[in-house]
């Protein structure tokens, strides 16, 4: 169990470092990095604060602490995927509206040139 917690800690710290470097180099926008930072911090806390992990295991009724860690991590990342799906949906709608506005402007320019 301790080996699993150490691996999870290492991966969490690695994820935190990757996100921070990506923000610094402008590979990811800061508003999107917040979700990744929260997820990495949550996994780091769960992997280092064993009494909290045990409490979550008891509250959830799960038989195994590693299973609790896995399910909590999966839950955090499932929430992240949903959040990014919402963001992508909004971006798609914005792109459609923008394309329609450009088409209208091009139509107006063409009609102005014909006059």
Image (spheres, grey):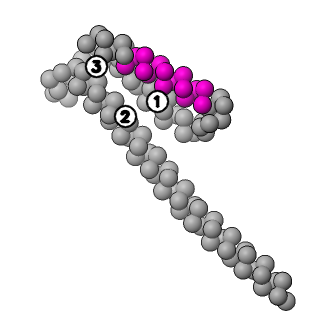
Q: Magenta-highlighted stretch: main secondary structure? A: helix
Query: Where does residue 38 sit, x and y in percent of width and height?
Result: 46, 30
Answer yes or no: is residue 74 visible: yes
Q: At 54% from the left edge and 35% from the top edge, which residue is drawn?
A: 33
Q: At 38% from the left edge and 40% from the top edge, which residue is drawn?
A: 79
What element does badge 1 sit on?
helix
Residue picked out by circle 3: 53
Q: How many marks?
A: 3
- Lower position in the chain sequence, tag 2 or tag 1: 1
Q: Would you say the residues marked 2 and 1 are in contact, meaning their CB atoms lie under 8 Å apart?
A: yes
Left or right side of 14 for 101: right
Query: Where does residue 5 sit, x and y in percent of width and height?
Result: 33, 15
Task: Answer above or below: position of 56 versus 100.
Answer: above
Q: Which mark is residue 76?
A: 2
Q: At 53% from the left edge and 62% from the top edge, which residue is drawn?
A: 93
- Lower position in the chain sequence, tag 3 or tag 1: 1
Q: At 24% from the left edge and 21% from the top edge, which residue is drawn?
A: 66
- Lower position in the chain sequence, tag 2 or tag 3: 3
Residue interval drawn in magenta: 8-22
Which is nearer the eye, 72 or 6? 6
Q: Which mark is residue 85?
A: none
Q: Which mark is residue 38?
A: 1
On the rendered image, what quadrant is the C terminus found in?
Answer: bottom right
Task: Answer above or below: position of 83 versus 62.
Answer: below
**What separation in Å lies between label 3 and label 1 (alpha carbons)?**
17 Å
What element does badge 3 sit on?
helix
The extreme bottom residue here reads 115
Q: Is residue 13 magenta?
A: yes
Circle 2 Cα neighbour tier, 10 Å, few/some/many (<14 / 14–19 / ≥20): some
């Amino acid at each position: 169990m301790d080996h699993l917690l150490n691996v999870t800690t290492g991966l969490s710290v690695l994820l935190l470092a990757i996100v921070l470097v990506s923000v610094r180099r402008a590979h990811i926008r800061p508003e999107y990095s917040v979700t990744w930072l929260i997820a990495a911090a949550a996994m780091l806390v769960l992997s280092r604060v064993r009494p909290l992990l045990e409490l979550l295991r008891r509250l959830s009724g799960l038989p195994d602490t590693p299973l609790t860690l896995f399910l909590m991590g999966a839950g955090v990342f499932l929430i992240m995927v949903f959040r990014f799906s919402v963001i992508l949906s909004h971006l798609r709608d914005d792109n459609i509206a923008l394309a329609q506005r450009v088409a209208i402007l091009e139509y107006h320019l063409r009609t102005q040139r014909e006059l």
